[in-house]
C-alpha cells in the first residue's frame, strides 16, 4: 500500500462516514514524518521516548476509532448467509491494527521508503 492511497482512503472515510479518527491518524502520521525529517540528517531513528509517545497516541486514536465506528444494523435477509459486511471505516481500522508495525516502522528506521 502506498502512502498516497492510504491518505486518499482516510480522507474519503473522514468525509463520507464522518469519522474524525481518520483525520487524527492522518495528522499524526504527518507529524511523525515532520519529526523524522527534522532529525534524519544526524540520526537514523527517533529517540525512544518520542517513539513511545507517538505509539501511545496512535493506539489512543485507534481505540477512539473503534468506539466511533457504528455497529452495523443486524439486517437478516432471508437467504443471506455468511459473514456480515463491514464498513470501509471498519476495514481501514482493522488494517491499521493489523499493520501498525509496518505503518509506524519509518520512525524506527529512517531507510523505510514510506514517503519517498
Image: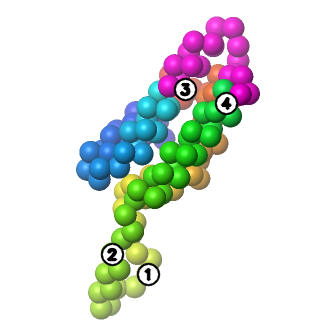
The residue located at (29%, 87%) in the rendering is: 77
The verdict on residue 65 being magenta is no
Q: Quadrant of residue 78?
A: bottom left
Q: CA separation, marks 2 and 1?
A: 15 Å
Q: CA separation, marks 4 and 2?
A: 38 Å
Q: Is residue 90 left or right of residue 96?
A: left
Mark closer to the chain start, 4 or 3: 3
Name the residue that disc number 4 marks.
51
Q: CA separation, marks 2 and 3?
A: 36 Å
Mark closer to the chain start, 4 or 2: 4
Q: CA separation, marks 1 and 3?
A: 40 Å
Reply above or below: 35 against 97. above
Name the residue that disc number 1 marks.
82
Residue 107 drawn at (x, y percent): 63, 27
Q: Badge 3: how crowded within 10 Å, few (<14), some, or many (20+)?
A: some
Residue 51 drawn at (x, y percent): 67, 30
Contact between marks 2 and 1 (CB within 8 A): the answer is: no
Marks 2 and 1: which is nearer the front? Answer: 2
Reply above or below: 98 against 104. below
Residue 66 drawn at (x, y percent): 48, 57
Name the residue that disc number 2 marks.
73
Q: Badge 2: how crowded within 10 Å, few (<14), some, or many (20+)?
A: few
The residue located at (46%, 39%) in the rendering is: 25
Helix, strand or loop under label 3: helix
Answer yes or no: is residue 13 visible. no
The verdict on residue 40 being magenta is yes
Q: CA separation, marks 4 and 1?
A: 41 Å
The residue located at (59%, 19%) in the rendering is: 36
Amino acid at each position: 500500500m502506498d502512502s498516497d492511497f492510504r491518505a486518499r482512503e482516510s480522507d474519503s472515510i473522514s468525509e463520507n462516514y464522518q469519522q474524525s479518527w481518520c483525520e487524527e491518524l492522518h495528522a499524526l502520521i504527518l507529524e511523525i514524518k515532520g519529526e523524522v525529517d527534522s532529525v534524519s540528517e544526524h540520526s537514523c531513528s527517533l529517540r525512544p521516548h518520542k517513539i513511545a509517545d507517538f505509539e501511545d497516541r496512535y493506539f489512543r486514536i485507534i481505540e477512539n476509532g473503534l468506539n466511533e465506528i457504528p455497529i452495523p444494523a443486524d439486517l437478516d435477509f432471508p437467504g443471506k448467509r455468511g459473514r456480515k459486511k463491514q464498513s470501509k471505516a471498519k476495514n481501514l481500522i482493522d488494517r491499521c491494527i493489523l499493520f501498525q508495525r509496518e505503518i509506524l516502522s519509518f520512525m524506527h528506521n529512517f531507510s523505510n521508503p514510506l514517503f519517498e
